[in-house]
Amino acid sequence: MLQDKGLSESEEAFRAPGPALGEVSATNAANAANASEPALAAPGLSGAAIGSPPGPVADVAAAAEQTIENIKVGLHEKELWKKFHEAGTEMIITKAGRRMFPSYKVKVTGMNPKTKYILLIDIVPADDHRYKFCDNKWMVAGKAEPAMPGRLYVHPDSPATGAHWMRQLVSFQKLKLTNNHLDPFGHIILNSMHKYQPRLHIVKADENNAFGSKNTAFCTHVFPETSFISVTSYQNHKITQLKIENNPFAKGFRGSDDSDLRVARLQSKEYPVISKSIMRQRLVSSQLSAKPDVSPLHGAHQALQHYQYENGAHMQFAAAEPQDLPLNTFPPQRDSSLFYHCLKRRDGARHLDFPCKRSYLEAPSSVGDDHYFRSPPPYDQQMLSPSYCSEVAPREACMYSGSGSEIAGVSGVDDLPPPPLSCNMWTSVSPYTSYSVQTMETVPYQPFPTHFTATTMMPRLPTISTQSSQPPGNTHFSVYSQLSQCQVRERGPTASFPRERERGLPAVCERKPPSPHLNAANEFLYSQSFSLTRESSLQYHSGMGAVENWTDG
DNA sequence: TCGGCTTACACATTTGAATTGG
DNA sequence: ACCAATTCAAATGTGTAAGCCG
């Protein structure tokens, strides 16, 4: 029996990588300079470089950069994902939150064994359409509703060493999806009948290289076959059957060899054996059985995987796998929805200054800052703008942790400053707040419940340009410190964490404002990952007037 | 009227405490 | 007293279907 013990969601012993794993590599020409030093070939060097730099800073940076871009990620059960993808993956979203199936599990290689990384997932709109299931296929049904506030799911093991991540599968199976706009549990909020694309981010989060340092690097991995359409009830009977056949929890709906027990039970209750929708679907299916399968999600495969450097000197686009190319009549997809991105920070003078460096308790940003979030960004910019996704929802990680004081006693990171807020928090609502404040008339978001603290209602995060004017130094925050404390609680000797908390009972400590640190991590990821992905990003940056501050120091 | 959403339900799995035996 | 294996009940995950809602 597979159980989440000890290593939390990294629960499964990884079997030899084979066809079940599709791999995405971050290696590219940018490594040419260091090609003679494979990251894993010299773990000692890399580890030393990260932990206690023996040489010039430039060497340390080079070693760190080399590692991050050599990371390879393989999707577990790729074949199963493909099965779903070919049928048009649907993911149930409920008010209480629903897990994804297939669950998102990856095998990571190429990390520096001694360097600490944060692994997190976000789910972004794959396009700006709303869909409906009609005539046994997904069709565009209009323009997408305003995107939900972007939330991240930080793997509860984060931060952990590369050795830890590479030891076994990294499972995000506890990630939950919800359609509750006011979800208090940190689940990822999605709109029903919309198409989404999960993305995996790997962030180097060493104690000495926290966000904000010049060496911060991360990469983003996207597997097109993991795209899906969110639904509140299954539309495609094929998906239902695939779920039942493959999800252990749905075994009760599997038919036996000689009879369908479920049907028999239902019949005994004089219930209709087959629902109207199922009947309709089956009728349509039979009528259309001769037709080739259509899957809207294939459209996502039109997306390109790209890799680029922040300085723009290296940009590599590669078509998705041939077998992933669209086979359907799905509308053209925006290539921005799917990408592979790996970023490095080369410029030593460049300094990432995160919004969180300003206390959440600070006064609202200046009027000059607000204009960056005055209107809901269009789809492109939602994808690209920090204002679209800048929340962190480390639900699992946070739910494992106790209050800040509790953490302090067992964290073992006494050298780190105590967090102003526990990571045991609600998902940040800061971007959402700012966003909705500016667009309350058009965005169908509801007001926050009263239990949101004043902190969560803090105004818009400062702009990048403003941030960059902040001097480095003690204003540097450490996502590592935040996550590590959660982590220690989870895996430490006192980790006999009440199960009730993990299972979602809203413990008091969960109802806390978001950590500005984690928010900043999110801000960082989005601002970075979208910084150069598309033309619109340039427009965005132009609008921000902050690019120079970032790229030119 | 209809499509989408919520909810209760039954069943299966997971989890951890309690129990048992060495 | 200690430890490992087993048992068991509660919690959780799952799809279904009825009913609600706009």
Image (cartoon, coloured by chain):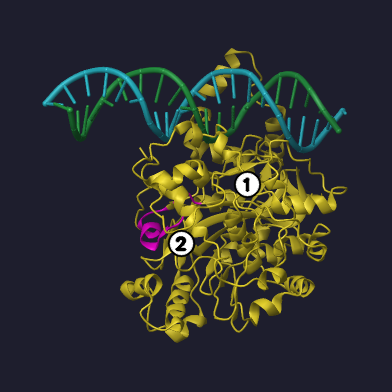
Chain colours: A yellow, B cyan, C green
For the C terminus of chain A, the image quarter is bottom right
Image location (x, y in percent) of residue A404: 50, 45
Left or right of C9 in this view: A523: right
Q: Is A511 placed left or right of A8 in the picture?
A: right
Chain name for mark 1 = A
Residue corresponding to mark 1: A427
Residue drawn at x 70%, y 76% is A547
Magenta residue span = A155-169
Q: Locate residue A132, reporting x and y percent.
A: 76, 45
Q: Amino acid at mark 2?
A: Tyr
**Residue at (56%, 72%) from the top-left corner?**
A343
Query: Which residue is rendered at x = 52% and y = 70% of the image?
Result: A216
Residue A263 higher or lower than A324, as above or below: above
Tell me where residue A66 sits by quadrant.
bottom left
Mark 1: amino acid: Thr
Residue A392 shows in this picture = yes
Locate residue A387: give its quadrant: bottom right
